[in-house]
Amino acid sequence: MRSEIQIFSGNATPDLAKAIADHSDIPLGELHIQKFSDGEFQPEYKESIRGDYVFLVQSTNAPSDNLMELLMMMDAARRASAGYITAVIPYFGFARQDRKDKPRVSIASKLCANLIAKAGANRIMTMDLHAPQIQGFFDIPVDHLDSSAIFIPYIEDLEIEDLCFASPDVGSTNRVREVASYFNAEMVICDKQRKRANEIASMTVIGDVTGKNIVLIDDICDTAGTLTRSAAMLIEKGAKSVRAFCTHPVLSGKAYENIENSVLTELVVCDTIPLKQESSKIKVVSTAELFSVAIRNMFENKSISSLFIHSDKKKAEPVA
């Protein structure tokens, strides 16, 4: 008897999980997470998953309960004899702690990779890791989806003239360069120096933006300090307009206030993390179809890389 696909959701991204299930024409599985008065919780599958391909959709953004919930969901699935467990983690939290950049600190993203594999995951599916090399922290297969498959068609529909792409920091240059090459457009870099986390000491623009319509691209928007300061500097340097595309809307602290008061035309984000509040400048685009097709391709042993938009401007057709 052939194994079936079952999709379940944790509490971090229930709307995205439902949308993925809808695109897959699969009912979202029934999973009850009981909460106790002291804050402890217990996931319980309300249907048999024995021998099935189980996909558990859960971003691991703050609070850390989201990570613990995912670990317990995987452990419960393993103990319920699931045939193959894939952790679908649209946003992989703790990814910014990917190296020991000062004495006596944790490499938290490696620790999370170990925990996820140990809890029972056979495979990971995620999107736009803060550092692509984090894939190497896992000793199990990783399907690393690229938000450019969603952002590029959006930018094409805008039909922007005098287009120029900008990286808000040196760390995002490879990601931005790939998109810029797709459009045969120029690229500039906003080079920043920090005093401490979430606080910028200085910033300079490398490249000419005079008369250009700028598209800033990054993987994470946290406090939006870097993003809004970059946008302001680009306008000061002669740019006609600045809009930003960020995959993961962490949006902590004064992020919403910073964005509303900024010179940004718009901020386009994915639904890998639910927004805490609405904003006139923030537009959310869905990743559900991309994850749905990736899940189907994985189940049918078809290519995942065929879903990416490469610099040769050939967009792969989604597999039904």
Image (spheres, grey):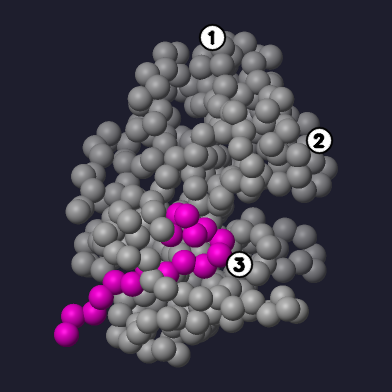
In the image, residue 317 lies at what x, y percent?
21, 45
Closer to the eye: label 3 or 2: 3
Q: Which residue is mark 3?
A: 66
- Give percent across and percent down for residue 178: 41, 37
Name the element at disc 1: loop
Residue for point 76% across, 66% down: 105
In this rendering, position of residue 143 left or right of residue 255: left
Q: Residue furthest left?
A: 1
Q: Are marks 3 and 2 in contact (CB under 8 Å)?
A: no
Identity, as a three-letter code, of the amino acid under mark 2: Ala
Q: CA distance from mark 1 to mark 2?
A: 27 Å
Q: Quadrant of residue 18?
A: bottom left
For label 2, the SS is strand
Q: Which residue position holds label 2?
A: 201
Q: Which mark is residue 211?
A: 1
For residue 134, say whether it is visible: no
Q: Amino acid at mark 1?
A: Gly
In the picture, measured across the screen, residue 284 lies left or right of residue 258, that is left
Counting residues from the start of the chain, the first of labels 1 and 2 encountered is 2
Identity, as a three-letter code, of the amino acid under mark 3? Asn
The mark nearer the N terminus, 1 or 3, is 3
Instruction: For marks 3 and 2, give the CA distance.
Output: 33 Å
Tag nearer the camera, 1 or 3: 3
Nearer to the camera, 88 or 162: 88
Identified at 22% across, 67% down, the residue is 301
From where the camera sits, is residue 221 visible? Answer: yes
The image position of residue 54, as x and y in percent, is 36, 75
State the quadrant of the N terminus: bottom left
Q: CA distance from mark 1 to mark 3?
A: 44 Å
Range of residues picked out in magenta: 1-17
